[in-house]
Amino acid sequence: MSVRISRQHWEALLAELEVARRQRHLVTYRALLERVQLPAPAMQTLAAALEHLAAIDTRADQPLRSALVISQGASRLPRTGFFECAERLGRFTGPSDGVAAASWHAAEVVRVFEFDYPAEAKPE
């Protein structure tokens, strides 16, 4: 299934992630969905947009901004799909749960907080 995101929603997503980065906060998938107001199927659209952003960040050799988005559950980690995407992009190896994933994610979040991203690329 192909999922598309409008320019307006893409720019809103990037703006929300930039606010989180500047404030050094993580944001849950649910909060991001509410703030960006993605149309149905919202979660699939958000997941696809975050994977696209991860690919953009990887091509630019930048930390993955999608690491700022986490589940609201006790783990406080991104969903499994984030780690699978990071593995496909050559950024992470290992199981998507457990200490290795949590440690890599924590380090990536610090990298995102400390990185100064250039003016934003638009979706392709």
Image: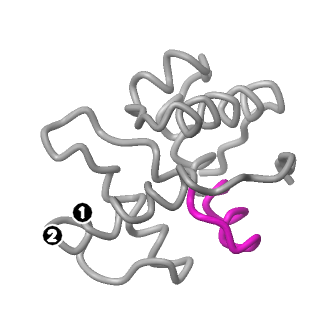
Pointer 1: what residue?
102
Q: Which mark is residue 121?
A: none
Q: Residue at x 65, y 44 (%)?
A: 3
Q: Residue 113: percent from the left, percent from the top?
A: 53, 49
Looking at the image, residue 35 sits to the left or right of residue 98; the answer is right
How is the rendered protein coloured?
one colour
Instruction: Kindly state the secondary structure of the residue where label 2 is placed.
Output: helix
Q: Is residue 80 above or below residue 15?
A: below
Q: Is residue 85 above or below residue 110?
A: below
- At label 1, which amino acid type do we have? Ala
The residue segment tinted magenta is 52-64
Q: Is residue 36 above or below residue 89?
A: above
- At label 2, which amino acid type do we have? Val
Q: Residue at x 57, y 52 (%)?
A: 65
Confirm whether the magenta stretch covers residue 62: yes
Q: Residue at x 28, y 82 (%)?
A: 94
Q: CA distance from mark 2 to mark 1?
A: 5 Å
